[in-house]
Amino acid sequence: MSMLAMARIGLDDLSGRFEAFVVHERSDLAACVEIIESVRRWELRRVAGRTALETSGFSEEGADAIMLAVRERWSGRIVGCVRGIFARSVAHQPQVHHEYRLDLVPPELIEYTGIAARMAIMPQMRKTGASLVLTRAFFEHSIRDCGMMLFCVSCEPALLSMYQRMGYRAVGRAWAKPSGGYRVPTLLVGHDEEHLARVRSPLLPALRRLPRPWPDAGLRWFRAQPDLPAESGVRRWEPRYDHRALSVLTAGLSAAGRRGLLEHAVEVEGQPGDLAFREGDGVRGLAVVLEGEVSALRGDRAVARLGAGEVIGVASAVLGQARQASIVVERPGTRLLLLSRSAIERVRGANDRTALWQTLAQILAWRAVHERPCVEPVPEVFHDSDSAA
């Protein structure tokens, strides 16, 4: 996040532009549901209405839950919401244990464990302080009024660094959901003041406002855990991690252009059988196979095998089409670099934008001329050494 963006969020926070509150009124609940639905169905366009914000916990009928909303004071409009679920109400579900690693939490602490199952902010408000105000209020309310000590989130790889800045830690490796897409189970120890201070968490002021002494059962349990994973299987792209396989996508780009395109990209290590993307899904991001091999399937039929250097999702990112095939990992050690649709927009220079759009157009045109699915391997002409930036 840029210094300007951080300053804007800080100004919103200091000015009190937004306020968060627990939802009780039907009209407020309806506004929250409308925001969630607009994100999941019209923006993310997940398969059959599914969304990146959907989790095993959220889908549980009758789950013990709370909803918080955030509204802009001057307009009175609700601009975002978050739904929290008490782990005790869904702990009997095996899929919830897998998704959130509740199997790590002892039974006596499940009662004091919360799950942040769905959070949605209106697109035009995502660069404001709305999400900060909402997240902090959810954290404070859950500890003060609900007695929570531990918080679980199943996050997308691209959001892992954001959650880590808040104080969450990965407690399992990235895994692919049966409905497609990778998730990372994370855990926040609510009373770990030392860790929140170390990562400069924006939740720290909320914690310090709570009266002491704080309950320490959750913190004592966490500090006694010897076997938490050291690796999440997710790594943010950095220039020193650059890879020859990226030369197809970055052909002709300057160093600045490459940085803009790859700035927020994340690398995920897949396992054989992982459903990285699902046919018909509306997610518009790109992916590059760095190592290993994946298969493209239409229905149950394999239509292509893609190796290192192949670019996946060009039609989705450029034309706004749903995924034309499912992508399944075939080999151990397969690594995918994931880029959001906004990565294309971050390439600013005129020459760089021309080079990038020319590359994307060439890939689409070749596949269209050859009547191949938009996941077919790119011809060797795009792989020669002269194309490396």
Image (tube, grey):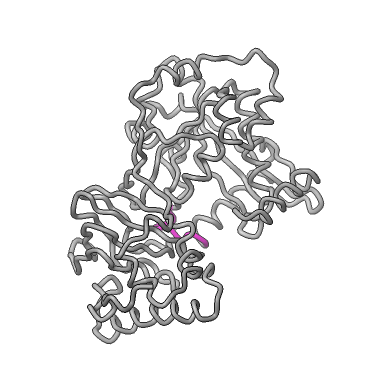
Q: Residue at point 64% right, 44% down? A: 29
- Using the rendered view, name the quadrant where residue 315 is placed: bottom left
Instruction: Give the residues in magenta.
Output: 43-50
- Above or below — where is 193 with respect to 383? above
Q: Residue at point 21% right, 61% down? A: 295
- Above or below — where is 170 with respect to 35? above
- Residue most extreme to the bottom: 369
Q: Position of residue 95 (x, y in %)?
A: 34, 35
Whether the magenta-drawn stretch holds residue 301 is answered as no
- Image quadrant holding the C terminus, namely bottom left
Q: Position of residue 34 (x, y in %)?
A: 60, 53
Q: Position of residue 190 (x, y in %)?
A: 56, 26
Q: Residue at point 50% right, 19% down? A: 219
For the image, the number of numbered tags is 0
- Using the rendered view, name the quadrant where residue 286 is placed: bottom left
Residue 61 versus residue 116: which sits nearer the camera? 116
Q: Position of residue 150 (x, y in %)?
A: 51, 25
Residue 381 versus residue 97: which sits nearer the camera? 381
Q: Residue at point 55% right, 76% down? A: 349
Instruction: Describe residue 67's horizontal placement relative to residue 342 as left or right.
Output: right
- Above or below — where is 297 with respect to 191? below
